[in-house]
Image: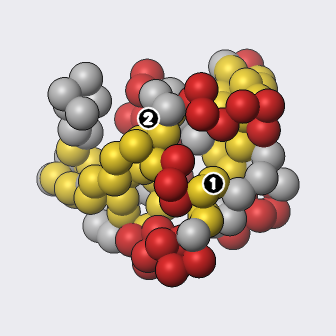
Amino acid sequence: MIYKVCSQAEWQAAGRSGAYKGSSDDLRDGFIHFSSAGQLATTLAKHFAGRNDLVLVHVDAAVLGDTLKWEKSRGGELFPHLYGPLSVADAAYIQELELGKDGHILPDLEAV
């Protein structure tokens, strides 16, 4: 699984249109930024600190085919980047992210 963090409003708009085209950062960069399970906590802390309007979109990387590329990013680490829109139908699971006193509370990703 790979994970996309986005606002509830962005995901609701995707639900109405059938596809998530990305955040303003994604649109600027030309691809949709995803994180692996091991990268998620750092992504949340670096790019979404203090936000309480977020959802976590779980996606099986295998369904994305050739539009998904693993590319070097932060610290030379490989990150999943989707070159094209994400079909809402490709989301395996969606959940709201809770904000605790020390940051976002990550769900048990293995339990989903």
Q: Quadrant of residue 45?
A: top left
Task: Say which mark, if any, is on residue 40.
Answer: 2
Q: What residue is at 34 percent from the left and 47 percent from the top?
A: 93
Q: Earlier in the sequence, mark 2 or mark 1?
A: 2
| Badge 2 amino acid | Leu
Question: Which one is nearer the viewer's eye here, 106 or 84?
Answer: 84
Q: What residue is at 72 percent from the left and 31 percent from the top?
A: 65
Callout 2 environment at 10 Å: few (<14), some (14 to 19), or many (20+)?
Answer: some
Q: Is residue 9 left or right of residue 90?
A: left
Q: Quadrant of residue 73?
A: top right
| Alpha carbons under labels 2 and 1: distance apart | 18 Å
CB-based contact (under 8 Å), mark 2 and mark 1: no
Against 109, residue 33 (above or below) is: below
Against 43, residue 7 (above or below) is: below
Label 1 element class? strand
Q: Quadrant of residue 96?
A: bottom left
Task: Say which mark, if any, is on residue 101.
Answer: none
Callout 1 environment at 10 Å: few (<14), some (14 to 19), or many (20+)?
Answer: some
| Badge 1 amino acid | Leu
Task: Say which mark, if any, is on residue 86.
Answer: 1
User: Looking at the image, how many numbered discs can be counted on the residues?
Assistant: 2
Against 15, residue 66 (above or below) is: above
Q: Is residue 99 left or right of residue 31?
A: left
Residue 58 is situated, as x and y percent measured from the top left of the image, at 42, 42
Q: What residue is at 21 percent from the left and 56 percent from the top?
A: 98
Q: Is residue 25 left or right of residue 1?
A: right
Residue 85 is situated, as x and y percent measured from the top left of the image, at 71, 57
Q: What residue is at 84 percent from the left and 54 percent from the top?
A: 30
Label 2 element class? helix
